[in-house]
């Protein structure tokens, strides 16, 4: 059996952001731009091949079409992302959800699911969410 994960840690972080963006069935351009900016600018993606985003997107959409696909996706993410980066993953998810200036009920439910699946402490989650909200305020 092959022990190589289907997704690298970077792929899994990208998959989580794509999942949050897709959660309201409206992947807005501003959310896609946010994902691209995160991948292009955060140190965690320094050596990441952005061409992987197409493959990762396909995996996400294929899984989301399956009955237990979201559970499978979270399993892949937990397997690929080191636990010490779970808060980073949640922060990137919040930034994508907040990118368009409003968070839909389905995005809120997805963020709640991410908090649960990655076991993010409530206080830490509130601080991360507040930071995302502050970064995406408009005049």
Image: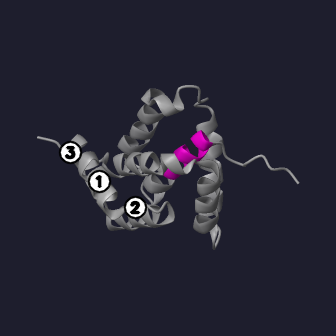
Q: What element carries label 2?
A: helix
What x and y, as percent, mark residue 19? 50, 55
Disc 2 marks which residue? 111
Task: Determine if residue 128 is in view.
Answer: yes
What x and y, as percent, mark residue 68? 63, 72
Disc 3 marks which residue? 134
Q: Which residue is drawn at 33% across and 57% down?
A: 125
Disc 1 marks which residue? 129
| Residue 122 vs residue 63, the one in the foreground | 122
Q: Residue at x 50, y 47 (%)?
A: 84
Task: Determine if residue 65 is in view.
Answer: no
Q: Is mark 3 on a helix, strand or loop?
A: helix
Q: Residue at x 38, y 61 (%)?
A: 121
Image quadrant holding the C terminus, namely: top left
Residues at marks 2 and 1, CA–CA distance in whole angstroms: 10 Å
Label 3 packing within 10 angstroms: few (<14), some (14-19), many (20+): few
Magenta stretch, residue numbers: 9-16
Q: In this view, does 122 lie to the left or right of 51?
A: left
* Magenta-span inclusion, residue 112: no
Q: Is residue 126 left or right of residue 109?
A: left
Residues at marks 2 and 3, CA–CA distance in whole angstroms: 17 Å
Mark nearer the N terminus (2 vs 3): 2
Q: Are marks 2 and 1 in contact (CB under 8 Å)?
A: yes
Mark nearer the N terminus (2 vs 1): 2
| Residue 67 vs residue 95, the one in the foreground | 95
Q: Is residue 34 above or below residue 115?
A: above
Label 2 packing within 10 angstroms: few (<14), some (14-19), many (20+): many
């Amino acid at each position: 059996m092959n022990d190589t994960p289907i997704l690298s840690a970077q792929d899994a972080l990208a998959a989580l952001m794509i999942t949050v963006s897709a959660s309201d069935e409206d992947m807005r351009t501003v959310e896609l731009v946010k994902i691209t900016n995160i991948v292009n600018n955060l140190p965690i993606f320094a050596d990441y091949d952005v061409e992987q985003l197409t493959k990762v997107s396909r995996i996400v959409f294929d899984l989301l079409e399956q009955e237990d696909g979201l559970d499978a996706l979270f399993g892949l993410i937990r397997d690929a992302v080191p636990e010490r980066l779970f808060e980073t993953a949640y922060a990137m998810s919040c930034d994508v959800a907040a990118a368009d200036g409003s968070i839909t009920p389905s995005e809120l439910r997805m963020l709640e699911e991410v908090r649960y699946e990655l076991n993010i402490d409530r206080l830490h989650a509130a601080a991360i969410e507040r930071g995302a909200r502050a970064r995406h305020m408009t005049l």
